[in-house]
Image: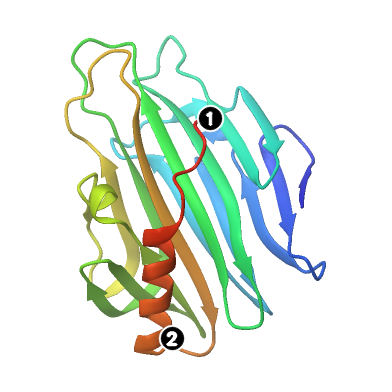
């Protein structure tokens, strides 16, 4: 269940009432922050303009069934508009799984916009075709992508330091919407086994495409 407070801010509770997701989508210089909660641990994914400019400011946000949708509309001085759709896939004793779908469009004629995702202070555990696993403090965090969505992403992470992922960056035609879906998995203090990782990859592959925003 999503609970909204101020514009662009919301939390999602699991079925047992425990906090699972926090979203702060103010935009601007602060960017967008999505925090996964699992037991006593938390991991925050921050979204910013890859060029270093401010993101557009939040224009609209709403909860729709299992999704929280934040719309950062393109203003006069912005290179693009951004919509982030966040959904709780699963929250149980083993893991918290969150789906993020980002959409981007522009009114500019010649543009190559991109956003950069980062998670601070991570240590890479493994990098595989379908995604990567990092350790954040005492907790493990996974990122999973389908083959279709991998083409829109570039992994800029090192072995130690912030997890960094550039999303989009190719030529974006005026009025065209580009979309990328990803799953983030908070595993807590226990590293996932190969079997658990493979099962989650299979679940993503079988998951229906989300509704358009």
Q: How is the image coloured?
A: rainbow
Query: Where is residue 135 drawn, in percent x and y?
Result: 41, 80
Question: What is the total number of numbered labels drawn onto the structure image?
Answer: 2
Q: Which residue carries the number 2 mark? A: 192
Pointer 1: residues within 10 angstroms few (<14), some, or many (20+)? some
- Left/right placement of residue 199 relative to residue 2 reads left
Query: Where is residue 176 drawn, in percent x and y?
Result: 30, 19
Query: Residue, x 59% and y 39% (percent of image)?
Result: 25
Query: Residue, x 43% and y 30% (percent of image)?
Result: 54
The residue at the far right in this view is 17
Earlier along the polypeptide chain: callout 2 or callout 1?
2
Query: Where is residue 145 drawn, in percent x and y?
Result: 32, 58
Q: Which residue carries the number 1 mark? A: 213
Tell me the SS state at disc 2: loop
Q: CA distance from mark 2 to mark 1?
A: 32 Å
- Left/right placement of residue 197 relative to residue 39 reads left
Tell me the SS state at disc 1: loop
Comparing 86 with 39, the one in front is: 86
Say whether marks 2 and 1 touch (CB < 8 Å): no
- Left/right placement of residue 7 relative to residue 89 reads right
Comparing 53 with 186, the one in front is: 186
- Left/right placement of residue 134 relative to residue 7 reads left
Is 103 situated above or below 130?
A: above
Pointer 2: residues within 10 angstroms few (<14), some, or many (20+)? some
């Amino acid at each position: 269940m999503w609970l909204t407070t101020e514009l662009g801010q919301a939390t999602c509770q699991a079925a047992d009432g425990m906090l699972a997701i926090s979203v702060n989508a103010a935009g601007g210089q602060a960017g967008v922050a999505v925090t996964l909660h699992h037991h006593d641990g938390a991991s925050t994914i921050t979204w910013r303009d890859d060029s270093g400019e401010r993101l557009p400011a939040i224009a609209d946000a709403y909860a729709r069934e299992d999704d929280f949708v934040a719309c950062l509309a393109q203003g006069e001085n912005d290179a693009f508009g951004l919509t982030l759709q966040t959904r709780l896939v699963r929250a149980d004793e083993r893991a918290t799984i969150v789906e993020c779908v980002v959409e981007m469009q522009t009114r500019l004629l010649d543009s190559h916009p991109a956003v950069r995702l980062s998670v601070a202070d991570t240590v890479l555990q493994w990098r595989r075709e379908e995604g990567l696993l990092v350790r954040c403090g005492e907790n493990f965090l996974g990122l999973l992508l389908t083959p279709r969505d991998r083409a829109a992403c570039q992994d800029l992470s090192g072995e130690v330091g912030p997890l960094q992922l550039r999303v989009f960056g190719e030529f974006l035609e005026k009025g065209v919407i580009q979309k990328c879906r990803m799953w983030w998995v908070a595993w807590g203090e226990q590293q996932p086994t190969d079997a658990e990782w493979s099962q989650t990859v299979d679940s993503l592959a079988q998951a229906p495409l989300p509704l358009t925003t």
